[in-house]
């Protein structure tokens, strides 16, 4: 089972070897990354279909938890680790230019650290992977080499730096109070030691710190500029997956350690504020990339609302919304590769690129939640769950969510109408160049995934339900990492 | 020493104070390089907090000796963690400064507001849209053209 470590170690090794190999032989250098990621996909895919009993915990370095660092693999972690490797392969910077080696090395670094975020079962280890992912992101955004990209990277770096200081402070508080950083061990100790004011402070610090990547409401000022200046493939990866991984950490913290109503309510309030600010800003945006960025803030807000729901079906809604957003937003960013500029320029674009327009319409329909498409089921689960809650705050969440859907419909179908409008372009702006073939093909891939999910919605729903039930089971997590000793004490 | 004020309390207050000073500096400073420096201060505070979380006042350095009875030792885990955190911090600071050099080369200065405006303008231009009007500037044309700086100053002096 130890080859699970390879999904983190191999991309890391590849990232450091790549610049050297590229000098020796360009052919080997170019193939190294895709081969590593392909192997990772194969490995994790095999695990999914093998009969190994999940969840399992792997001690790294020969020390058992809670003294050593462990990787924790349940269906949820496996799902996200697989998504990281696959999406890394899809969003791989294939374009050849003079700094291909650097971009590819950074991308491998990003994939390695993201896989680590999905798998690690140690709080400080998570922090290290989180910083590693941040550094790789800075490098990849700055690789665009426009002045705006540098300025945007700097803004992101400062916000992310604030986030890491807050996270570190939270970790220090938790450690000084409990003397451990293993998530399972913390989960055992939390009811005695961390369910007080100090624990809440630590939780808030970590929530805001990790929330920088998850596009949480007060700390998401970096989002529109980064997505406007980074390459579309990178934006797709960041909006689609890295934000979800940060969310996964917060989910683990909520399930295992801070299982209190106050902790959940904060997430709900921040989520609601995120939805409102993101969707209105997206409605006002005049260019495609920033619109997608703001819309991503809004969608993440909706996912945070789902995160605040107390029971398993809430977690099911969270998973469905996350995976749905992953597919849709990455696909839309691929389309933005050709249609990145002003929305005005898209008038009549359906004539020039009928496939692109059809894909955009499909994504928009699913994002809004039109019945046969998966987006409907994800949103439907969330609505029924929200309506079943008795707390008034959830009712506000429901109202805001419905309002957000109306706004979403308005700005997405405004674009669809433009795409299919027959009116001649009145502005004298240059027309878009043709959609790059690779982006269109990638976007089609996401559309096919979406359609396949529409047909297979029942088995997918059952599968996600099982994943949600397993992830919600804190007792199972503790038992897996620290097998019970007589008396239940360490 | 003032009664009730222990060394421990002073150190914890210092750590927290450094973080607060640093964060306030990031928010308030108008020059990008000062923001980096403020971040360095905040990180120092967080690191100090991490070291303190495992420190014991009556203990020795955590080295195993061939002795019958071991004295109480300081917790080595936070010390290992703080090393990692310091290395990460230094790496990010170096990256920040190198990005600042590029910004300085392209935009000519490092004033926060100026860089933000130039960045907005550049993104808007590359997307081909008209820029949003800044909230600080009033709508419409100016009724009077602004005076050159030196005449305005001398007038102020006369009055």
Image (cartoon, coloured by chain):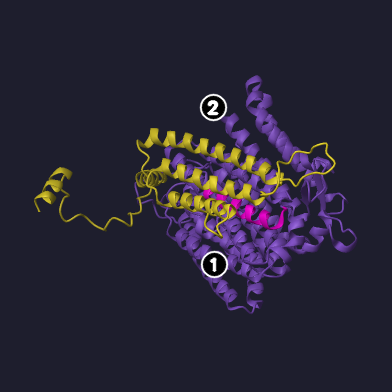
Chain colours: A purple, B yellow
Position in image of residue A247 (x %, y %): 63, 56
Position in image of residue A211 (x %, y %): 58, 55
Position in image of residue A124 (x %, y %): 67, 48
Q: Is residue A10 part of the magenta span, yes or no?
A: no
Q: Quadrant of the N terminus of chain A?
A: top right
Which segment did they paint magenta?
A160-180
Question: Could you tell me which chain the residue with mark 1 belongs to?
Answer: A
Identity of the residue furthest to the right in this view: A486
Position in image of residue B133 (x %, y %): 32, 54
**Front disc: 1 or 2:** 1
Q: Secondary structure at mark 2?
A: loop
Q: Is residue A125 left or right of residue B113?
A: right
Precedes in sequence: disc 1 or disc 2: 2
Q: Is residue A421 left or right of residue A27?
A: left
- Kindly identify which numbered label has been placed on residue B119: none
Q: Secondary structure at mark 1?
A: helix
| Residue drawn 75% across the image and 43% down it | A41
- Asked if marks 1 and 2 fall on the same chain, the answer is yes
Q: CA distance from mark 1 to mark 2?
A: 44 Å
| Residue drawn 64% across the image and 38% down it | A109
Question: Could you tell me which chain the residue with mark 2 belongs to?
Answer: A
Front residue of this view, candidates A482 and A315? A482
Q: Quadrant of the C terminus of chain A?
A: bottom right
Count of labels in the image = 2
Identity of the residue furthest to the left in this view: B158
- Magenta segment, principal secondary structure? helix
- Kindly identify which numbered label has been placed on residue A98: 2
- Kindly identify which numbered label has been placed on residue A272: 1
Identity of the residue furthest to the top in this view: A24
């Amino acid at each position: 089972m130890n080859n699970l470590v390879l999904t983190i170690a191999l991309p890391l090794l590849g990232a450091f070897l790549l610049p050297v190999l590229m000098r020796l032989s360009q052919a080997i250098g170019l193939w190294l990354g895709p081969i590593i990621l392909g192997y990772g996909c194969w490995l994790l895919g095999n695990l999914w279909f093998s009969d190994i009993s999940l969840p399992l915990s792997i001690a790294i370095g020969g020390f058992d938890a809670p003294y050593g660092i462990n990787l924790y693999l349940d269906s949820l972690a496996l799902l996200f680790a697989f998504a990281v490797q696959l999406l890394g392969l899809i969003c791989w910077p294939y374009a050849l230019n003079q700094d291909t080696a650097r971009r590819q090395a950074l991308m491998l670094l990003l994939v390695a650290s993201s896989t680590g975020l999905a798998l690690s079962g140690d709080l400080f280890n998570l922090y290290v992977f989180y910083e590693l992912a941040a550094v790789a992101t800075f490098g990849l955004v700055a690789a665009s080499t426009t002045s705006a990209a540098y300025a945007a990277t700097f803004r992101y770096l400062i916000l992310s730096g604030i986030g890491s200081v807050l996270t570190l402070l939270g970790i220090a508080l938790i450690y000084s109070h409990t003397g451990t950083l293993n998530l399972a061990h913390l989960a055992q100790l939390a009811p005695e030691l961390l369910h007080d004011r100090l624990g809440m402070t630590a939780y808030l610090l970590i929530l805001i710190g990790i929330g920088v990547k998850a596009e949480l409401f007060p700390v998401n000022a970096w989002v529109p500029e980064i997505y406007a200046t980074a390459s579309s493939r990178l934006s797709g990866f960041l909006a689609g997956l890295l934000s979800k991984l940060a969310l996964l950490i917060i989910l683990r913290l909520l399930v295992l350690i801070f299982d209190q109503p106050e902790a959940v309510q904060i997430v709900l309030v921040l989520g609601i504020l995120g939805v409102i600010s993101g969707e209105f800003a997206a409605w006002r945006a005049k260019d495609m990339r920033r619109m997608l960025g703001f819309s991503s803030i809004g969608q993440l807000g909706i996912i945070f609302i789902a995160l605040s729901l107390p029971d398993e079906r809430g977690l099911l809604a969270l998973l469905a919304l996350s995976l749905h957003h992953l597919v849709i937003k990455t696909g839309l960013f691929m389309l933005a590769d050709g249609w990145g500029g002003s929305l005005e320029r898209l008038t009549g674009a359906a004539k020039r690129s009928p496939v692109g327009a059809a894909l955009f319409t499909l994504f928009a329909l699913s994002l809004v939640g039109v019945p046969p498409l998966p987006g409907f089921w994800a949103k439907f689960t969330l609505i029924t769950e929200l309506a079943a809650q008795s707390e008034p705050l959830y009712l506000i969440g429901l109202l805001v969510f419905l309002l957000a859907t109306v706004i979403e419909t308005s700005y997405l179908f405004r674009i669809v109408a433009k795409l299919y409008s027959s009116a001649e372009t009145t502005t004298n702006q240059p027309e878009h160049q043709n959609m790059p073939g690779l982006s269109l093909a990638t976007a089609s891939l996401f559309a096919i995934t979406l359609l396949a999910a529409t047909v297979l919605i029942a088995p997918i729903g059952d599968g996600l339900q099982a994943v949600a039930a397993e992830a919600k089971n804190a007792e199972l997590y503790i038992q897996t990492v620290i097998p019970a000793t007589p008396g239940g004490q360490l | 020493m003032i009664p009730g004020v222990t060394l421990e309390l002073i150190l914890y207050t210092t750590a927290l104070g450094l973080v607060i000073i640093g964060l306030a500096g990031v928010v308030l400073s108008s020059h990008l390089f000062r923001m980096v420096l403020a971040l360095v201060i905040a990180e120092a505070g967080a690191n100090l907090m991490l070291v303190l979380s495992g420190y014991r006042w009556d203990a020795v350095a955590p080295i195993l000796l061939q002795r019958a009875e071991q004295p109480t030792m300081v917790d080595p885990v936070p010390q290992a963690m703080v090393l990692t955190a310091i290395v990460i911090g230094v790496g990010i600071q170096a990256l920040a400064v190198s990005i600042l050099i590029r910004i300085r080369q392209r935009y000519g200065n490092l004033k926060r507001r100026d860089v933000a405006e130039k960045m907005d303008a550049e993104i808007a231009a590359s997307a081909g849209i008209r820029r949003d009007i800044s909230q600080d500037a009033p709508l419409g044309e100016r009724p009077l053209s602004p005076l050159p700086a030196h005449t305005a100053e001398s007038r102020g002096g006369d009055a």
